[in-house]
Amino acid sequence: MSLQHPGLRTNGQQLNQPLPQTKHPNCMESYAHIVAVGVADGTYDQKVPEYQITLNAGGASWARTLEGDGELLSFLEASLALRKDLVDAAVRKLHETGHATIPAVEIAESEAPALGLQKAPIDF
């Protein structure tokens, strides 16, 4: 039994070839990390959870604060175009533990500011 790198496929010979690229060349592949950061004042004197989402890719971080589950869901599903099952799983984990990570999020770096994301400084 031979093991091979998951990013490689065998073409029937002893030669391995990489799988074809399917990602958009102008997108940065990253992960989204969501943290419950507190409670904000909502409408009608209601308190709503406040979340910070950070997208990390290639040494750059982009962050945004969102108020309430509705704004969070809208951002994840509409702005980032994430599948509903991924969003539901992340929100479930966020409610249980106070944080969640969604891997393999793609976003064009040029679109980040238009989505309300601000470039965050990173300490190494």
Image (cartoon, rainbow, N blue to C red):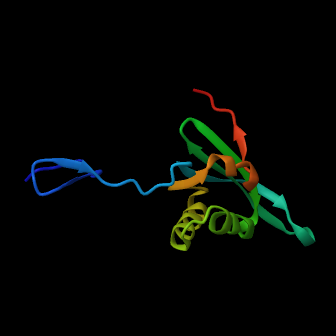
Q: Which of 31 and 80 is in front in this view?
A: 80
Residue displayed at 11% across by 57% down: 12
Examine the rendered structure and indicate whether residue 75 appears above or below residue 21. Answer: below
Residue displayed at 89% across by 69% down: 43
Residue displayed at 74% across by 48% down: 113
Residue lying at the far top in this picture: please name it: 124
Q: Residue 96: horizontal and vertical position, in percent?
A: 57, 63
Q: Is residue 40 left or right of residue 89?
A: right
Q: Residue 17: horizontal and vertical position, in percent?
A: 23, 49
Q: Residue 80: horizontal and vertical position, in percent?
A: 62, 61
Q: Nearer the viewer, residue 88 or 4?
A: 4
Examine the rendered structure and indicate whether residue 4 appears above or below residue 93. Answer: above
Q: Nearer the viewer, residue 85 or 95?
A: 85
Examine the rendered structure and indicate whether residue 68 appears above or below residue 108. Answer: below
Quick one: quadrant of the C terminus? top right
Residue displayed at 57% across by 67% down: 87
